[in-house]
Image: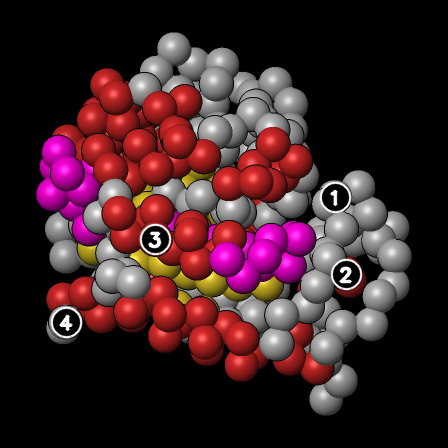
């Protein structure tokens, strides 16, 4: 069966650039995939798997795992790597926490990842809505572990604390790229906000924390090493390292395809620097095998 790259297949306007064999994945399909898609539509929810054109959608959905995206499908920021649409979001849905809990209650899940768009239009960045979603999952699905992949809330300590007080099992926030590329890749974000978010969650609330880093954007090896040191320094426990893939010709270009053996080297190096678990590989994304990553902490 021929394999096609999903991110390029979905964006026909993107330039055709030959991908290494290790980055080619099958198109999504299968009974579990169709069932999950139907449930998402039924409850009027969004997934980052679809909105961000994740190449792992077929694998994850057929394994019965997905990442729900709350607070709408329009982001107030315009990051150069991200395929989530930018624009003026609608007001938060007051019924969304209950809908998320109801949907997850219909699935044989033990681990759920929740993320959101940035909502800089809201006074608290959506923090209270986040807390309501986590508590609704706790009420309707008490056996399900919750990973909250949150925005930086512009470094607002009160907003970060509001989410942390809802006690997710893992508090995740992605730095996305090295410090020198933040302005180019994430112009409305700040590296220090990201580190502060993780530090508050770990140092103040004792939560297991996690971050993600994309490679192939022009970073250097010493910069990757320094980023891993910075994350370990604020108590980050888990790091995901993956290859950046350009969603369309409107997004930042890929500067390099990182070979699988380099990811293996970074994994060993990151763990030697104090990160408890590093999930590294070309197709790794922040939510990829998230349940296994959390298990690695508990079994350490």
The residue that mark 2 highlights is 8
Where is residue 106 shown, x and y percent of the image? 31, 56
**Real-space Cα distance between discs 3 and 1?**
28 Å
- Does the magenta portion include 268? no
Helix or strand or loop: what does disc 1 sit on? Answer: loop
Q: Nearer the viewer, mark 3 or mark 1?
A: 3
Residue 28 placement, left or right of 287: right
Which residue is drawn at the image coordinates 14% and 71% (left, top)? 300
Q: Nearer the viewer, mark 2 or mark 4?
A: 4
Helix or strand or loop: what does disc 2 sit on? Answer: helix
Which of the labelled discs sits on residue 300, or is there none?
4
**Real-space Cα distance between discs 2 and 4?**
38 Å
Answer above or below: position of 83 versus 94. Answer: below
Q: Which residues are magenta?
A: 201-222
Which residue is drawn at the image coordinates 44% and 58% (left, top)? 225
Q: Which is nearer the N-term, disc 4 or disc 1?
A: 1
Which of the labelled discs sits on residue 251, or is there none?
1
8 vs 274, nearest the viewer: 274
The quadrant where residue 114 appears: top left
Residue 41 placement, left or right of 173: right
**Real-space Cα distance between discs 4 and 1?**
39 Å
Is residue 140 visible in this depiction of the protein?
A: no
Badge 4, how many Cα within 10 Å: few under 14, some, many 20+? few
Which residue is drawn at the image coordinates 26% and 47% (left, top)? 233
Which of the labelled discs sits on residue 229, or is there none?
3
**Real-space Cα distance between discs 2 and 1?**
12 Å
């Amino acid at each position: 069966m021929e394999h096609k790259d999903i991110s390029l297949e979905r964006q026909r306007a993107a330039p055709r650039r030959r991908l290494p064999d290790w980055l080619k994945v099958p198109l999504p399909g299968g009974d579990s995939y169709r069932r999950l898609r139907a449930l998402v539509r039924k409850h009027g929810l969004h997934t980052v798997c679809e909105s961000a054109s994740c190449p792992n959608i077929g694998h994850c959905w057929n394994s019965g795992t997905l990442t729900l995206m709350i607070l709408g499908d329009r982001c107030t920021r315009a990051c150069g790597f991200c395929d989530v649409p930018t624009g003026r979001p609608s007001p938060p849905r007051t019924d969304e926490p209950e809908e998320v809990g109801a949907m997850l209650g219909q699935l044989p899940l033990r681990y759920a990842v929740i993320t959101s768009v940035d909502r800089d239009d809201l006074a608290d960045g959506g923090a209270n809505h986040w807390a309501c979603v986590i508590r609704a999952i706790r009420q309707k699905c008490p056996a399900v572990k919750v990973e909250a992949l949150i925005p930086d809330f512009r470094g607002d300590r009160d907003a970060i604390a509001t989410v942390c007080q809802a006690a997710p099992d893992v508090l995740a926030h992605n730095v996305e790229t090295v410090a020198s590329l933040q302005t180019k890749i994430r112009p409305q974000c700040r590296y220090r906000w990201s580190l502060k978010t993780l530090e508050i969650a770990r140092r103040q609330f004792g939560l297991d924390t996690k971050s993600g880093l994309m490679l192939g954007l022009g970073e250097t090896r010493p910069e990757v090493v320094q980023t891993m040191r910075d994350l370990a320094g604020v108590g980050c426990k888990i790091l995901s390292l993956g290859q950046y893939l350009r969603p369309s010709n409107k997004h930042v270009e890929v500067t390099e395809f990182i070979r699988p053996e380099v990811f293996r080297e970074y994994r060993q190096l990151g763990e030697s620097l104090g990160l408890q678990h590093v999930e590294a590989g070309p197709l790794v994304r922040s939510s990829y095998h998230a349940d296994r990553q959390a298990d690695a902490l508990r079994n350490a």
